[in-house]
Amino acid sequence: MGRYTGPKWRIARRLGVNIYVGEEKSQKGKAITDRRPYPPGQHGKSRRKISYYGRQLMEKQKVKYYYGIREEQFRRFYEMAERMKGQTGENLLKLLESRLDNVVYRLGFGKSHRHARQLVVHGHILVNGKKVNRPSFLVKPGDVIEVREKSRNIPDIISGIELAQQRGIPSWLELDAENFKGIVKAEPTREEIEIPIAENLIVELYSK
């Protein structure tokens, strides 16, 4: 099965959290989840209380939809996180934050995770001066991410940078907006992930 490309706010209501926070029109989505804080569908209001296993699954779904990744990709990153030192759940989120498509979004070159992924795949993004077209490419401290010169007049990239500056650039990244360039200063921090995620529940789910 491919990535979900349907209505964003239907998923936000199903998960009970605005997983598209920070993106353009996210305030509209927040209003929707505030106004209708129950799952979509005819029986959304009357659904039974979610089980503990259901909560575990929901936390995993939050992460998958937020970063826009498939199940097999998620499992691969989880296995990488298990092999790292430290807490598996936190390692997992740091790995996902380090994906090139996410960094492109965080810097504002992409107006959303979807848009950022398209920019990477279509060859608009350079890493250390070389074109990288793999959204899952993991950046590391010291890497320089920039929009290639021929793509710097794309209106969505220009407006995306303005949007990112309004919401704030994470402390582990540095944006040179004038030159369409960003620098990875350090590893991602758990504290700056925008949506509430109980990663311990994901670890429990995969530890069964």
Image: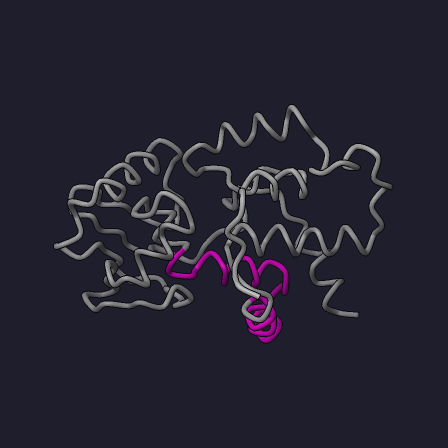
Q: Magenta residues? A: 74-101
**Quarter where residue 154 is shown:** top left
Left or right for 112, reference 72: left
Q: From the viewer's perspective, is residue 82 above or below residue 100?
A: below
Q: Which one is nearer the viewer's eye here, 14 or 62?
A: 14
**Quarter where residue 176 is shown:** top left
Question: Quadrant of the image for the N terminus?
Answer: bottom right
- Residue 95: within the magenta? yes
Q: From the viewer's perspective, is residue 2 above or below residue 4?
A: below
Image location (x, y in percent) of residue 150? 12, 54
The residue depicted at 59 percent of the width and 53 percent of the height is: 63
Q: Which residue lies furthest to the left in this view?
A: 150
Left or right for 46, reference 56: right
**Quarter where residue 127 is shown:** bottom left
Image location (x, y in percent) of residue 191? 54, 45
Q: From the viewer's perspective, is residue 80 above or below residue 171?
A: below
Image location (x, y in percent) of residue 33? 63, 31
Image location (x, y in percent) of residue 190? 54, 50
Q: Which one is nearer the viewer's eye here, 140 or 155?
A: 155
The residue depicted at 26 percent of the width and 58 percent of the height is: 145
Q: From the viewer's perspective, is residue 83 above or below residue 28?
A: below
Left or right for 43, reference 200: right
The residue depicted at 43 percent of the width and 60 percent of the height is: 98
Left or right for 44, reference 51: left
Question: Quadrant of the image for the C terminus?
Answer: bottom right
- Residue 57: within the magenta? no
Q: Which one is nearer the viewer's eye here, 193 or 123?
A: 123
Q: Which colour scheme is used?
A: one colour
